[in-house]
Image (tube, rainbow, N blue to C red):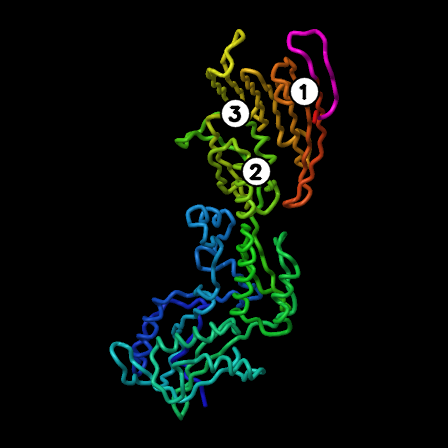
Amino acid sequence: MHQNEDVRFTSSSIKLPQFSPFTLHHPTLNPFFTNLHLILQKFPKFQHPFHQNGGISQTLSKFTHPFHQKFNPQNAILQFLSTPRNINPFSWSLSNTPLLCCASIALTQSNLDGTPSLGPKTGSGNEERVLISEVLVRNKDGEELERKDLESEALNALKACRPNSALTVREVQEDVHRIVASGYFCSCMPVAVDTRDGIRLVFQVEPNQEFHGLVCEGANVLPARFIEDSFRDGYGKIVNIKRLDEIISSINGWYMERGLFGAVSGIEMLSGGMIRLEVSEAEVNNITIRFLDRTGEPTVGKTRPETILRQLTTKKGQVYSMLQGKRDVDTVLAMGIMEDVSIIPQPAGDTGKVDLVMNVVERKSGGGISAGGGISSGITSGPLAGLIGSCAIYHKNLFGRNQKLNLSLERGQIDSIFRINYTDPWIEGDDKRTSRSMMIQNSRTPGSLVHNHPGGSLTIGRVTAGIEYSRPFRPKWNGTAGIIFQLSFLFEFLSVLVLGMTRGILS
């Protein structure tokens, strides 16, 4: 049985010459196959990532899909900025790209030696059908496949191409797509052979290589154990692109679950069954603080930038994590001096890294003075008879370092209290987040309230001072150490004689 030289189907991985009409000396023109070429010229031609032509391996980085053509974390970041937070900016599916499941068919003109052409069969609409007597799967050389399981995979993928069936061009092309979409083959070329029993349709396939090793580049935070477990089941087996798609989706999902800016950016099949996996991770290049007013316009802030930056757990050189960024926003808000905080990631030029801009809006009332007073009719003797009042001076962001200072004075008719409180939530130069609090208090209380001597003129004075240090040791665990000193004494009002002085707490 000889092969029909008039008709030949080829995959899109081969560059086809421009179609030219048959010469007039051809005995009869076959309108079906003539229309076949014209129809298929309208279909896009894609190339399989693992198909090797002339020893040059085609990689997934050459996807015809725009996102895969120039994958860069910068593009993903920009996409993230313009999409809701619950949408994965890195999500993509290999199975949805035409590269893995598209192979177009075209007709190449062969030597016209006068071999009778096949006439068209009846069809529906404008699509004519050709009766196929036999359907076979062979290797690219036209010989039987060594592995029968691969032949079964290709035959099982066929839907329309069956023996003794009338097929259209589109049905043949769709079955070519299905064979490639099975994931086991890097090319598929349907060839029509004219035999005495009718037209034999042969799908010449080229299986993928067997997987024997993996080279992963750019995965700095992705655990090596995770990658090894993902590829372990496929070792020594034919590479299946559908399974490869699942592995890539699981790797991208690992980054997404942790809020990390990372994704698989390329994959390549090397000689010897080696797969090279490229992972792109967006590292933090720089962190800047931008002060805004309530209208969103830039302004000059009162807080020192280093006071804010030391609160952040995100550092330069780390892979940016959205979850970690959210915790940093909550930490800055917990300082109590900011009204609104947000982090905006931006591409850092062409470096593949990301610059973080933290927008902060400071509270207006960083400090102030409060006072109040009144008159009481309980006691009417003395120069300030019946006068009571209080006064307080406070500042929540002293020197722009988030230090708190509070001075207060309270005076009644027969008692008074003066307090000074100072808090430094993070001692400068300490890397353990150690805080320090200091307190001084001076009070005067009539002795008659304590010793039940209504007619006496005794006064109890107390001077209290203390200092306290606190440091976090583990999450939700803090350690505190401090000392408090108190001096108490008794004296008679308007008398030089001191009746008593004690150290410690008066009981």
Residue found 49% across the figure and 21% down from its top: 368
Q: Nearer the viewer, residue 279 or 454?
A: 454
Q: Which residues are magenta?
A: 490-505
Of the numbered discs 3 and 1, the one sitting upstream in the chain is: 3
Determine which residue is flagged by label 2.
286
Farthest residue, direction bottom: 197
The reply to whether discs 1 and 2 touch (Cβ–Cβ < 8 Å) is no
Q: Residues within 10 Å of mark 1 (few under 14, many from 20)?
A: some
Question: Is residue 148 positioned above or below 374 on the image?
Answer: below
- Residue depth check, mark 3 versus mark 2: number of the one nearer the observer: 3
- Rendered position, 161 above or below 232: below
Residue that badge 3 annotates: 302
- Above or below 260: residue 229: below
Q: Are marks 3 and 2 in contact (CB under 8 Å)?
A: no
Find the distance from the CA under tag 3 to the CA under tag 2: 22 Å
- In terms of depth relative to the viewer, which is nearer, 215 or 396? 396
Tag in front: 3 or 1:
1
**Residue 463, labelled with which disc?**
1
Identify which amino acid the numbered label 1 is placed on.
Answer: Val
Q: Position of residue 70 (x, y in %)?
A: 48, 52
Picture residue at 66% right of the left edge, 30% below the top: 436
Reply above or below: 138 against 314.
below
Q: Choose mark 1 or mark 2, whichever is in front.
A: 1
Label 3's element? loop
Q: Is residue 115 left or right of residue 432?
A: left
Q: At 43% across and 70% down in the image, what residue appears? A: 103
**Residue 341, percent from left and from top:** 49, 37
State the residue in front, 92 or 253.
Answer: 253
Query: Residue 179: x and y, percent?
Result: 46, 76
